[in-house]
Amino acid sequence: MFLVITYDVQADRTETYRKLLTKFLTHEQNSVFAGDLTESEYMKLRRSLSRLAIPGDRILQFSAKNRHNVKASSFSKNHGNGALEERDLLHHSMGSLIL
């Protein structure tokens, strides 16, 4: 499954969330993580998040059955002409192909 998770927690808890999520996903920016997980990896992540979360923590998740059902990309300004450039997020792909 392809997963994007972001969180909004108290400042003193952000490092704890970052450490946990980087075990499973790629750290995209600040509190945003994305990547491909097997069902068992996803269940481990959910159990870990359940143990970590306290009332008031907000965790937002977007998921798809596989990364082929969603296009993930990032935008950044070109240093040369200032144009907005789109780049596919392929660095966290599992590398499998559908034939």
Image (cartoon, grey):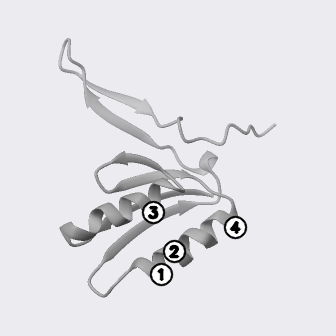
Q: Which mark is residue 50?
A: 1
Considering the numbered disc 2 on the image, is that residue within a helix, a strand or a loop? helix
Residue that label 4 marks:
40
The type of residue carrying mark 2 is Ser
Whether tag 3 and tag 2 are in contact, CB under 8 A, the answer is yes
Residue that label 3 marks:
20
Whether tag 2 and tag 1 are in contact, CB under 8 A, the answer is yes
**Who's the residue at 47% across and 75% down the image?**
49
**Who's the residue at 21% across and 69% down the image?**
12
The type of residue carrying mark 4 is Ser
x and y percentages locating residue 79 in the rendered image: 20, 17
The quadrant in which the N terminus is found is bottom right
Considering the numbered disc 3 on the image, is that residue within a helix, a strand or a loop? helix
Of the numbered discs 1 and 4, the one sitting upstream in the chain is 4
Considering the numbered disc 4 on the image, is that residue within a helix, a strand or a loop? helix
Of the numbered discs 3 and 2, the one sitting upstream in the chain is 3
The type of residue carrying mark 1 is Ser
Of the numbered discs 3 and 4, the one sitting upstream in the chain is 3
